[in-house]
Image (cartoon, rainbow, N blue to C red):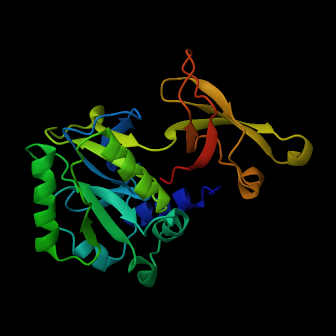
Amino acid sequence: MAHSNLTRRALLGGLAALALPVAALPAPALMLAREASQGIDPAGYLVSEKLDGVRAHWDGRTLRFRSGLPVAAPAWFIAGLPALPLDGELWLGRGRFEALVSVVRKANPVDAEWRDVRYALFDLPGAEGAFADRAAALQDTVARCGHPALVAVEQRSLADPAGLRQALKAVVDGGGEGLVLHRAEARWQAGRSDDLLKLKPLADAEAVVIGHEPGRGRFAGRLGALRVRTGEGVEFRIGTGFSDEDRARPPSIGRVVTYTHRGFTNAGVPRFASFWRVREL
């Protein structure tokens, strides 16, 4: 799936209309997930479905994407949110990521389209207490708020690795992406740690596009492979996983893409890296 830079320009135009400089909207501090090992014991964790949505942070006044850019949501959607920080995903349902992106990326929101969007919440950023306590407080917050788009993501305990495997299979068989494991006793802290893990049939990670390699043979005149760089500075190429549209209109240099892989070499290069999608904002 390839997306142009029109979204970013449109959102920047929306910021300009609000007279808010981009520098005044830094990326929000978020908890980020590490990859879980396939044999992990879920004892001590609360487990939820990993939603295939768009991350959104509410600071009590402004709804923002992970990048820090504002979400151009309808006034009624924003007006009903509580005056405390929230972290979650804008979500339309399993298998509807592309449709969701089409809705939330518009600088001028279409009210009818947003009626089906849910803000699925999984944490209270910066709140005191263990995650289990924050999850319970989040349930109460959603119930008191009565906002039709707000839902609290279901958190549950699983007894053993076998139960975790069964839960993962059920989600994936139903069209879901995977699971999230959040250490029940973990305090909130920004950044990536073992307190928050994601479990999927394939691992995924992100990298920045640094170059395009031309295609050959049946891909002549189109993209052959992306040259990318990870946050750790490892550079490699991704040559598979692209649709015909992706190859005709590849992600531009500087865009962040998500890819799947099957572990790493000793040099830290992802094995069998395959393009998944462009990270939206």
The residue at 49%/44% (across/down) is 201
Q: Residue furthest front?
A: 162
Q: Position of residue 170 (x, y in %)?
A: 41, 57
The answer to whether any part of residue 28 appears in the image is no
Residue 61 vs residue 157, the one in the foreground = 157
Q: How many marks?
A: 0
Q: Position of residue 11 (x, y in %)?
A: 47, 61
Q: Residue furthest top?
A: 266
In the picture provided, is 136 more to the left or to the right than 215?
Answer: left
Question: Which quadrant of the structure image shows residue 213?
Answer: top right
The residue at 29%/32% (across/down) is 194
Q: Position of residue 227 (x, y in %)?
A: 68, 33
In the picture provided, is 176 more to the left or to the right than 273?
Answer: left
Q: Residue furthest right?
A: 217
Question: Which quadrant of the structure image shows residue 92?
Answer: bottom left
Q: Quadrant of the N terminus?
A: bottom right
The residue at 8%/44% (across/down) is 128
The residue at 62%/35% (across/down) is 273
Q: Position of residue 66 (x, y in %)?
A: 38, 50
Residue 110 vs residue 169, the one in the foreground = 169
The answer to whether any part of residue 3 appears in the image is yes
Is the residue 236 above or below the residue 267 in the image? below
